[in-house]
Amino acid sequence: MTEPIFELNDIVVTVNHGTPEQINIMDHVNLAIYPGDFITILGSNGAGKSTLFNVIGGNIPVTSGQILLHGKDITSMSVERRTRFLSRVFQDPKMGTAPRMTVAENLLLSEKRGQNRGLGSRHLKTHMAKFKQITSVMNNGLEERLNTATGKLSGGQRQALSFLMATIKRPEILLLDEHTAALDPQTSQELMQATNDQITRNHLTCLMITHHLDDALKYGNRLIVLDNGKITYDIAGDEKDNLTKEELLSFFNDLDG
Amino acid sequence: MSIIVSAIGQGLTWGIVGIGLFLTFRILDFPDMTVEGTFPMGAAACVAAIYSGASPLVATLIAFLAGMLAGLVTGLLYTKGKIPVLLAGILVMTAAYSINLRIMGRANLSLFGKPTMLKNHFLASLPPYFDSVVLGIVVVIIVTALIIYFLQTNLGQAFIATGDNPNMARSLGISTDGMQIMGLGVSNGLIGLGGALVAQNNGFADVNMGIGVIVVALASIIIGEVVFGDLTMNQRLIAVTIGSIFYRFVILIVLKLGFNANDLNLISAIVLAIFMMLPVLENRFRIRHTLAKGMTKHD
């Protein structure tokens, strides 16, 4: 068995410490992520899906437990440092791009994710051909708008750009936080398809939060369900491939009851 | 004639203050009040340095450093101290008043009989007021060129991204705290530099010369934007200085109408308010539509 890239060991996140409202929003979570894993994550509102991503990204500190990258403890590593191996696409199209900067400028920024940025010239022009080729993959006309401010793009184009920005410099782990949820069904499906193509073609390791049971079943090699800050379900491989929507639904109904 | 040349000279000098404020107000999207303290701080530091025997050029650079230091304090209070940026600026501005009195030892210090950058052989040989125009052009070109170059670097792009979408910037590994501290530092450094040049131009530094600076600098930025409309980032930087000169002409006209220098802050505020309301007024009264109609032939 290969070594995991990334591990969460017995992670607890407690909020409202010492008050009657004290609650563990992450409750002794263990998760090992292996190279090439494409994990879909389901869970009702407040189950801890976003908390899980924020713990991985370093946006919220853990109360106890250990975070390992290639076996090395990175529990207290800052958000900025973690971007060296981690990238993320948010649900809100406004979150992932700089609205007054052009598409090309955004891509150039993301190409230096996690690296030091010095006083050398950015050399935007020498990147244009490459950017044109990269953006054409998304099949939504983004390649024609490289010099447009991203604030003027459609939501679908902005999310496609956010996805490209997260993957232009290969991340060791890619976090997709319901990145198609704010789009209309048609655009959402197109972006989801393009996402899947990119992930499988480039063998990216990815965690994807989704509300769509169908997407959770259709995509990825592994599926986990969160409830009340715990991982209550974690299946992979053939077991996941054979899982039906009815089985998954009945599982959710059990949780509610 | 000389009054117009003088206005251009002042506009150029104040253009540097406008460019400084542009970095925080437009790029970082910060209302930075520190400037009302750093402008007289630059003036005070420069005059005090000249008094203690420093060359005017060195004294002017010291003014830049003094302003930058104050800006760094605002940046640290905001990023590390978690004080809202408006309040952090007001705190430093208030503290700067006392510091400026300490620097000068008194409320007002004259440069009479002292060397300034305007008193070198070449500038002194020019007709009246042309000295400040030439000095202003040289400094504005150097500052504008440096800022334009900086904004095209990878660091400069990270700085712009921080103002545009701090969330995204962080997710790309950009230290937004670092960018904001740097921006406030450089911005206030430029404003201190502007204060030093204005002091040398006027021949004195005064602890109260900071009052209204933010309005004047904002007016330069807004007038430039209203007059020129949609521009690229580099063009906008240049438009600030042109807006600053334009503002001086407006003030000149108002003074010609019979107002006196004591009314200047009131007039500055009114001029800025009018320019900021132009988009609203334009929608309401369809100014541009009416103007366009007046320009076309009757059919």
Image (cartoon, grey):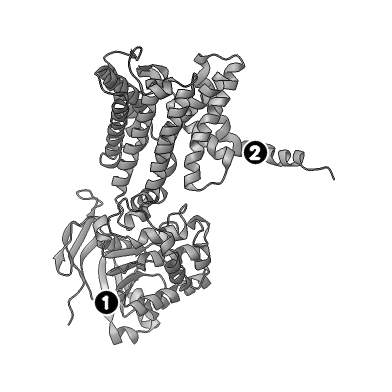
Q: Residue at x 52, y 60 (%)?
A: A153
Q: Which chain is mark 2 on?
A: B
Q: x, y (%) of residue A202? A: 34, 77
Residue B32, located in which quarter of the rendered image? top left
The picture places residue B104, in percent across and down from the top left corner, at: 28, 17
- The residue positioned 57% from the left and 33% from the top of the image is B275
Q: Which residue is mark 2?
A: B282
Measuring from the top left, give residue B277's x and y in whole percent: 58, 34
B246 or A42: nearer the viewer:
B246
Please say if A160 is above or below B291: below
Q: Secondary structure at mark 2?
A: helix
| Numbered disc total | 2
Q: Are marks 1 and 2 on the same chain?
A: no
Q: What amino acid is at disc 2?
A: Glu
The 10 Å Cα crowd at callout 2, few under 14, some 14 to 19, many 20 or more, is few
Which residue is tagged 1? A234
Q: Is residue A116 left or right of residue B145?
A: left
Badge 1 marks a residue whose secondary structure is: strand
